[in-house]
Amino acid sequence: MNQFKELLERSEQPIELIKNFFLGIADEGEKSHKKGCIVANTIVEMTFVDEDLEKEAAQILKDTEALYTNTIISEQRKGNLQSAISADVLGKHLITLWCGINSSRRIYPDRNILHQQIELQLQILQ
């Protein structure tokens, strides 16, 4: 995450970098699609089983959300992001997209379908 944060901070188009990160998921192989994300999996699987592990996984997603939210705030202030939706809501949307796409990629491990679904969800970042 620290490397991605540095990339966002140096990028002239950090919103495009975020979009490309999500779209890149579609290009991964079927084996990767079937595994999903260990953080999202941990939250789903460890709720009511291992509270500490669940909290740690949730914190990783909250930290990622904060990174997205701060990037969105900066880009809205610069006039590079026209969405009237608050940065807080958009940051949470991206975490929801992350968790959702990690389930969808198991159902539809197909590049075209995943790309289409991710693009649809990213239209909110205009």
Image (cartoon, rainbow, N blue to C red):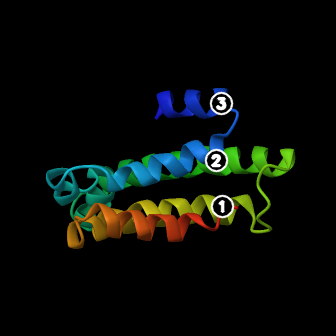
* Residue 16 in sight in this render: yes
Residue 50 in percent (x, y) is at: 24, 57
Amino acid under label 3? Glu
- Classify residue 107 as left or right of residue 9: left
Whether tag 2 and tag 1 are in contact, CB under 8 A, the answer is yes
77 relative to 87, above or below: above
- Label 2 Cα neighbours within 10 Å, binned few <14 / some 14-19 / many ≥20: some
At x 42% / y 60%, what residue is drawn? 98
Work out how far the residue at label 2 is from the one at label 1, CA to CA, in angstroms. Answer: 8 Å
Determine which residue is flagged by label 2: 15
Residue 122 in percent (x, y) is at: 56, 63
- Classify residue 48 as left or right of residue 67: left
Which mark sits nearer the N-terminus, 1 or 3? Answer: 3
Residue 125: which numbered mark, if any?
Answer: 1
Work out how far the residue at label 1 is from the one at label 3, CA to CA, in angstroms. Answer: 18 Å
At x 60% / y 46%, what residue is drawn? 16
- Label 3 Cα neighbours within 10 Å, binned few <14 / some 14-19 / many ≥20: few
Residue 111 quadrant: bottom left
Work out how far the residue at label 3 is from the one at label 2, CA to CA, in angstroms. Answer: 11 Å
Q: Secondary structure at mark 2?
A: helix
Residue 9: which numbered mark, if any?
Answer: 3
Residue 85 quadrant: bottom right
Query: Viewer-proximal residue, 44 or 34?
Result: 34
Amino acid under label 1? Leu
